[in-house]
Amino acid sequence: MPAIPHRPLQTLLHSNLLMALSKNQLLFKCPAGTTIPTYPFRLLRRLSFAPHPDQCLIKNSRNSSSKALFFAMKSSRVQSPGPLVPARTVHVAPVEEDTSFAKRVAMMKLKLEQAEIRCASFEPGQYSSMICPKCEGGTSKERSFSLFIREDWGLAMWSCFRAKCGWSGSIEASGKNKDNRVGPIQTSKVKEHRVITEADLLLEPLSDELVEYFSARKISAETLRRNAVMQRRAHGQVVIAFTYRRNGALVSCKYRDVNKNFWQERGTEKIFYGIDDVKRASDIIIVEGEIDKLSMEEAGYLNCVSVPDGAPSQVAKEIPNEGQDNKFRYLWNCKQYLDQASRIILATDGDRPGQALAEELARRLGKERCWRVQWPMKNANEACKDANEVLMHLGPDALKEVIAKAELYPIRGLFTFSDFFNDIDTYYSGNLDHDHVVSTGWSGVDEFYKVREHARKLLEKHIKKPFLNSRYAESAERMTVEELEKGKEWLNDTFHLIRCDDDCLPSIQWVLTLAKAAVMRYGVRGLVIDPYNELDHQRPSNQTETEYVSQMLTKIKRFAHHHSCHVWFVAHPKQLQHWGGGPPNMYDISGSAHFINKCDNGIVIHRNRDEKVGPIDRVQVHVRKVRNKVAGGIGDAFLSYDRVTGEFLDVKEE
């Protein structure tokens, strides 16, 4: 390759950017005899397959727009061209002599219009970007549709690079149309990947101009060297090459120009950028771009990786299974590195796609071990978008502070009592008479009343004073504000809440999923499910209630054993026929005898309601089953309940 004269960086990156096909398209003949049309940017890889390099050089188009070539590579979702099949012969495809140029142009325009592709201001021989006629660019009106028409107007090819569209096809002026697909791209899992080397890709060390470019973004030469950031030159262009390595070996390569146009080597394995830096890390930071990963390193964080494909426009409704999760293939390919992490900090961009990416990652990684960052203000009116902006405008210490202040990723349905402190304070200061509290008529509002009532009862048991000045308190002094504040701190440190905000009833699986998150995030060692009849117990029509209860209790036991978490499952007795007022037994639970068969401990709590039978303030505790005899035995105990303090006292039966 001839030497490139020294020119300013902007000149190198923007001059001669586009390459158009020669008037007659170059075709490469495979051994099997099939002919493959060659895209102009495919020749960027190597030109050594031709008898002489000059025979395959493509003419420069100095007058064309500098954006056209890279549109097909603009989005990180675009798959870059792969290696060419070595050609046995190179020949020029003949042009149909019986079709005039004007007829071909007219026929091509007609066929494109029939395909709803408008190309009024289109220049043949170049790639043009526009809004896709099928998906209309999504909600963001992304110009994701790339169209190419051969200079002789004999062939048109197009492709939409939005992941949820993927429409591609081709038209021949005097032949058949080929509409490849409409709808999300269903790419099968790649079993074999290209083996690439720096020599194959013509990579070379960064020039002084590019080192200077990174320096302006506060990225040092040492950080660039450690991460093997390189460059590539081809036909008057120079682009940044981010080398993706695993165990030091080159796996893939992603290219970028200074206008943030990206493309990747096709056919290579998708992995996180910088994956070797998190081999044995318990804390991992995930960012959205390679420069953000380098920025984290400048702040002292080596345990950082970047996603290779950018962010989705919005959160998907459902997560596909691993075999079909092509957008996040890199995550599954690096699963063994992520499984060992106990904390994953999601430091994606602050815009809407960046937040969608954080949600998609958290759904796959497990929200219980995910944290998220809040980017600081860049100035009085604008917040920083990503790690590099924080580094450039506020410095490395500010970036350290962002990571240090990362917050727990929110999990819908899992709360701490601090989330309801305002409601508890309002309840305390309002001095409401509990005996006159009625439903608001809105279940959503009533939920807050239930929470604060639950908090009141727990606080009274802990502080041993009434929460309110109410009739139930009689003459006892209510807890002070200082006692309330200490009690709230105790509540928040001791308990976590699982609440279903939807109108539907929660299933046992939903409860156990959130309980698992609480165990992993907060170290919870006890779960109270109260009561059984407020769970969703829908079951298949061919499953009996006994089978359902058995399966449900098995799930609970497995959860308890696997997570070393004690589970108290509160179930009420069914309506008893001819009940005499005495304590029920374990077989009286509505549903199945499996409640006593599968539990480790079975305890019946009963309170007498008939003054003729005995004291009504007496709580009876009947232990009816103890699997581990070392832990205790079957027997009865009696407690006296103090309504004022909420305290239970031992009572010896005569």
Image (spheres, grey):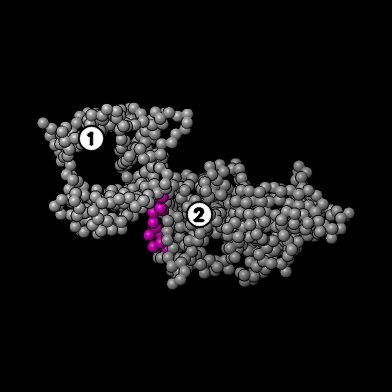
Q: Quadrant of residue 124?
A: bottom right
Is residue 412 in the magenta section? Answer: yes
Q: Secondary structure at mark 2?
A: helix
Residue at figure coordinates x 63%, y 54% from the top left: 135
In the image, taking residue 447 as reference, residue 55 lies left or right, namely right
Looking at the image, is mark 2 or mark 1 earlier in the sequence?
Answer: 2
Disc 1 marks a residue whose amino acid type is: His
Question: What percent of the width, then of the height, locates residue 175?
Answer: 80, 49
Image quadrant in which the C terminus is located: top left
Residue 606 is tagged as 1
Residue at figure coordinates x 58%, y 52% from the top left: 252
Does the residue at mark 2 contact the one at mark 1 (Cβ under 8 Å)?
no
Disc 2 marks a residue whose amino acid type is: Leu
Badge 2: residue crowd in 10 Å (few <14, some 14–19, many ≥20): many
Q: Quadrant of residue 261?
A: bottom right
Q: Residue 564, can we see it? A: no
Image quadrant in which the N terminus is located: bottom right
Front residue of 117/338: it is: 117
Mark 2 or 1: in front is 1
Q: How many marks?
A: 2
Residue at figure coordinates x 62%, y 57% from the top left: 137
Question: What percent of the width, then of the height, locates residue 263?
Answer: 61, 57
Residue 357 is tagged as 2
Question: What percent of the width, then of the height, locates residue 423?
Answer: 30, 56
Vertical placement of 595 versus 131: above or below? Answer: above
Q: Residue furthest left?
A: 654
- Tell me the magenta residue range: 399-415
In the image, taking residue 448 as reference, residue 23 lies left or right, namely right
Question: What percent of the width, then of the height, locates residue 217?
Answer: 51, 67
Front residue of 277/507: it is: 507
Q: Secondary structure at mark 1?
A: strand
Is residue 199 in the magenta section? Answer: no
